[in-house]
Structures are given as C-alpha cells and as structure tokens.
Amino acid sequence: MNTITLEVHDDRYVVTLDRPARRNAIDAEMIGELHQACASIETTPRPVLLTGNGDHFAGGADIGELRDRGREQALAGINRNLFDRIAALPSPTVAAVSGYALGGGAELSYACDIRIAAPTAVFANPEPALGIMAAAGAGYRLPGLVGHSVAKQVLLAGRTLDAAAALAAGLVMEVVDDPVAAAHGVIDRIVRQSALALRLTKTLVDAPGAHAWADDIAQAVLFESEDKYERMTAFLERKR
C-alpha cells in the first residue's frame, strides 16, 4: 500500500495514514486502501488502532480532488461509504489523534468508537468555507458525540475544538502526550474482555431507537456461551 500501513498483530490491527508530507490528506488512493484494510479486518475481526504518521492525524480530504468532483461523485458518497464501513467494523476502533483532524479527517475520527488526543489535536469541519458541507458522517455522528449545540457550533459557526475543548465536550476519552501508547493501553483492556459481548454491545449501542427486546436476545446468546461460563467461574474462584 502507498498511502497507509496495516499492521496485523495477534490481537489487534494498527492502521496508519501515511501521507505525512500532505498532512495525511485523504485522497482517492487512500480511500481505496482503507477499503482493503476494512476487508481484512472484517474477515478476521480484531480491535483497530487508527492513527496518522507524523504530526497530524489527517488534515482533511485532498482539496485538489474535491474541486474536480461533481454531482455524480457526491451522490456516490465516496468518503461517507468508507467512514460508514469503518463505523460498522465488528470490533472496537480507537483513534489516536495528534495535530489536525480537519474536514474528512475529523469525520474519519468521528467514525471510530473511541478517540484519544494529544495536546496538539485540533478537530474542525471547515467545509462550508470551501462551498461544501461536511457530508461524510459529521451531520449524523457529531451531534451524538458532543450534543446538537456544540455540533452546530462546529458545523455552522466554524468552531474548532482543541484538545481541551474536545475533552470537555466528550469527543475524546483523554488527552495525553502519547496518544498511540494510550490507545494501545485501551485496546489491551478491550482484548481482555469477551469479544462476542463487545461485538453485540457495539451493534446495539449503534442501532437507532429503543431496542430492549434486542438486548434481551443478545444477552440470551451470551448467557449460553462457554466463554461466559468460564469467565464467571474464574471470577468466583478468585473471590474464594
């Protein structure tokens, strides 16, 4: 791959956006390679750490390409389909964000389940200043992450969220000097838990509306699993 690296570990994937000279701007080639990464992850699900090479997570979409896109490309949802696919990955995803997460880069981070920021992190959606809108998921993800008021400040008033503001708004889990190391620490905790329980939990949390009956069905599946029995037996034996 030319624009990303995909590291496959026994218990996780590490995906790194790798166009540091362009602040990891998301171009068509990167979109295609991220789809390839998603295909691998979907085949053998494991938690995912997503980050950027260099000082920045992703400084937005490639403006040169966006300028030449027309109506048909917009209707194809090129970036949105990728980010929806990332959001739907079966295992938890953790974004480690340093520097700029702007435009499409911000929307890519919104598609992850958890975000950890460096003190340098800046989240923003300046698309209206370029004559377009943030149409790759920000409109329906950001309000759920930070509330409608803050989302409108970002999407309509051009507000940028630095690391402290992102933490206060609940967009990021924590602000640390080394977000990649912290993200690995989060994934260390994730992989000690039941993969099936996490997969069902993520599916239900992301599902729209109330679905108490679906929670009952998912719990019924887990109650019959050998993993549940072994984990609870080990817990009881530790208590003794």
Image: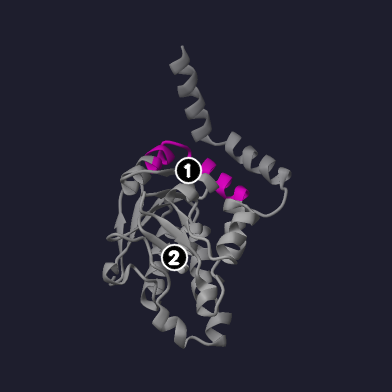
- Which secondary structure is most common in the magenta stretch? helix
Q: Which residues are magenta?
A: 186-205
On the picture, is 119 further left or further right than 173?
A: left
The colour style of the image is one colour
The image shows residue 145 at horizontal and vertical percentages of 57, 52
The image shows residue 22 at horizontal and vertical percentages of 31, 72
What's under tag 1, amino acid-wise? Ala
**Which secondary structure lies at badge 1?**
helix
Q: Which residue is mark 2?
A: 102
Q: In the rendered structure, which disc, 1 or 2, sits on the residue that comes first in sequence?
A: 2
Assess disc 1: are there few (<14), some (14-19) or many (≥20) residues with their C-alpha within 10 Å of its C-alpha: some
Please tell me whether residue 14 belongs to the stretch shown in magenta: no
Residue at position x 36%, y 60% in the image: 57
The image shows residue 70 at horizontal and vertical percentages of 53, 87
- Total number of numbered labels? 2
Q: Quadrant of residue 31?
A: bottom left
Residue at position x 29%, y 61% in the image: 53
Quarter of the figure with the N terminus: bottom left
On the picture, is 147 further left or further right than 227?
A: right
The numbered dot on residue 52 is: none
Q: Can see residue 148? A: yes
Residue at position x 50%, y 78% in the image: 130
Residue at position x 48%, y 38% in the image: 194
**Which secondary structure lies at badge 2?**
strand
What's under tag 2, amino acid-wise? Leu
Q: Which residue is mark 1?
A: 195
Q: Quadrant of residue 140?
A: bottom right
Q: Can see residue 141? A: no
